Image (cartoon, rainbow, N blue to C red):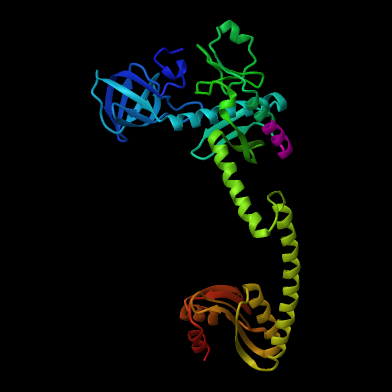
Amino acid sequence: MDANRLYYKNPYAAAFSARVTSCAESAEGWLVTLDNTAFYPEGGGQPGDTGTLGGVRVLDTQEADGEAVHLCSAPLAVGSEVEGYIDWPRRFDLMQQHSGEHIVSGIVHRRFGWDNVGFHMGADVITVDFSGPLSAEELRSVEREANEAVWSDTEFETLWPTAQELEHMDFRSKKELDGSVRIVRVGGWDLCACCGTHVSRAGEIGLIKILSAQKLRGGTRIEMVCGSRAYDYVSAAMEQNRKISALLSAKPLQTAESVQRLQSEEAAVRYRMVGLENALIELKAEAQTGRGDIVLFEEGFAPDAVRRLCAAAGEKCGGRCAVFSGTDAEGYKYAVCERGGDLRAFVKELNAALSGSGGGKPDFVQGSVKATRAQIAKFFD
């Protein structure tokens, strides 16, 4: 263990004193190294710490040539003594996320044999990629066991085994390791090589929630949140459900059932509306029998209804049929047909005159125009 890495001695140390050993300007800011630090440098999927050094903002912490390099917003004098303060709420949040991921990954590995092959802590959620498939039911079971680990308040232990001891440990690791290896053990739930920071006891995680899962390259990518993020997510979801519950006049645990009922009712209404719309289109088309070239304006017709009315009226009128539906403010959808005709030149002229776009077959075209009803009528006159 590197004695200068204070976060290994005590991950809860949010303040410390150090001496500046180097300071160099870069394109992003000033790169500062110290004789010891509690700032964790990005690694193992965990972002680097932020905070202040000597009153100067630390924007990020990275690893370079075996040293923790602090990206600062202003220079610090080499040799000076500085007080460092970590952004503790952010660090503790990352500790909760990282610790929860250990438990979930350990359970998946033990129960299904899948490896954690990718891990990223974002600002909102963390993603974990597993090497094999996981069903929704399996993930619900994993989540339940993960929270049982939290409720047990088991200890997070940090071990620095000898090479001989390491040979006899069945631990998780994404790569081959040599030299001194740091092992994190979480009761019977996980044993993993890890360089990150973790809570002391599982109870500090508070809550583990798996939000989503998707197939990825033969494996599974999950999104999850832990601790305060999980609390905030569940609170927001409950508030959304409370509003939906009020709108549906349904109990909070019966909103899905109410939505299903509404969907069934909506489908029945939509089916009836389509039937009535078809009957209306037939009547309107019949009224155009033998009229020759016609232009029709209809209110509230969707593009498909515009197409169907144009086709039906075009069969009856014996000439060219154009149908428009929309408003002067939003523009109009259109369909134009001429049985056996060639509308390509006409539609090109229409689109140019009425700021439109569209196309189709030589004898049937659809599109939209940005013009008023008066402008459309004038064009056809």
Q: Residue at x 67, y 19 (%)?
A: 188
Residue 86: x percent and y percent? Answer: 39, 27
Q: Dividing the picture into quarters, in which one does residue 153 lie? A: top right
The reply, left or right, for residue 89 in relation to residue 298 is left
**Does 361 appear above or below 200?**
below
Q: Nearer the viewer, residue 201 or 136?
A: 201
**Relative side of 33 to 328, left or right:** left
Question: 246 and 131: which one is in front?
Answer: 246
Q: Which residues are magenta?
A: 134-144
Residue at position x 57%, y 31% in the image: 118
Q: Is residue 381 above or below residue 209?
A: below
**Viewer-nearest residue: 209 or 1:** 209
**Residue found 64% across the figure and 18% down from its top:** 187
Residue 362: give x, y in percent of width and height: 61, 77
Q: What predominant SS class does the magenta segment belong to? A: helix
Regarding residue 103, the answer to whether it shows in the image is: yes
Q: In the depicted view, which residue is nearer to us: 358 or 136?
A: 136
Any part of residue 362 in sight:
no
- Left or right: residue 143 versus residue 101 is right
Q: Quadrant of residue 190?
A: top right
Examine the structure image and report whether residue 55 is included in the region drawn in magenta.
Answer: no
- As drawn, 281 above or below 167: below
Residue 76, percent from left and from top? 25, 26
Count numbered badges in the picture: 0
Q: Position of residue 111 (x, y in %)?
A: 72, 26
Residue at image coords 59%, 26%: 203
Residue 136 shown in magenta? yes
